[in-house]
Amino acid sequence: MVNQKKDNNKKLYIATILIILLTILAGVLLGKKKEPLAPNAEDKEAVDAYINNNITLSLQSMEERDRMEYYVAIFLGYVEGGEYEKAYNLLYEDFKQNYFPTLESFEQYLPTIFSEMSNIEHENIERNGDIYVLWLSITDAVNGKPGEQKKMNIVIQEENYNDFAISFSVI
């Protein structure tokens, strides 16, 4: 009877160990089958595509006005962040040729309208096909005085979600 009890204890012990090992193995195998939520950060093109896809999905769920204000915020973010070439690349080609044929001419113009930290008020928006016109009031958020607003129109041509060009009233 003692030997039978020892045999039963051994079997129970071995069964417990096998169950634990199988549970661990199943967890490892299931963990390996999960796909990553984002591509590997080392693959810049895949990361850029992933980010652009998420931005496009977000833009698709936005109202027109919100999308246009988002595009303006992207442009002004580049300007305020000193990323003038990125802002310049968002400009409509004919507008660039007529007003800012070089990046340097664009960079020289920017401080006359925008400060390092501009406060923007969106006053109105109108749409004509794929062209949107936004009326803005711009003030210097740091050094501005009450009543020192500059009025500007920004024109956005949206080809597709997150594919747009900007021009504006040169004041």
Image (cartoon, rainbow, N blue to C red):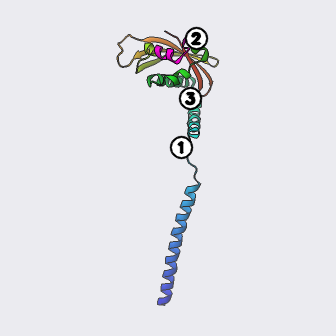
SS under mark 3 = loop
In the depicted view, which residue is nearer to us: 31 or 84? 84
Residue 94 lies, in percent from the top left, at 61, 14
Q: Is residue 98 magenta?
A: yes
Residue 69 in view: no
Dot in front, 1 or 3: 1
Q: Disc 1 residue type?
A: Glu
Q: Which residue is under mark 2?
A: 98
Q: Main secondary structure of the magenta part?
A: helix
Q: Disc 2 residue type?
A: Asn
Q: Residues within 10 Å of mark 2 (few under 14, many from 20)?
A: few
Residues under labels 1 and 3: Cα distance? Answer: 31 Å
Q: Disc 3 residue type?
A: Met
Residue 124 in view: yes
Which label sits on residue 62? 3
Residue 58 lies, in percent from the top left, at 56, 33
SS under mark 2 = helix
Q: Is residue 115 magenta?
A: no
Instruction: Tell me the magenta residue range.
Output: 97-109
Q: Residues within 10 Å of mark 3 (few under 14, many from 20)?
A: few
Residues under labels 2 and 3: Cα distance? Answer: 32 Å
Q: Which residue is under mark 1?
A: 42
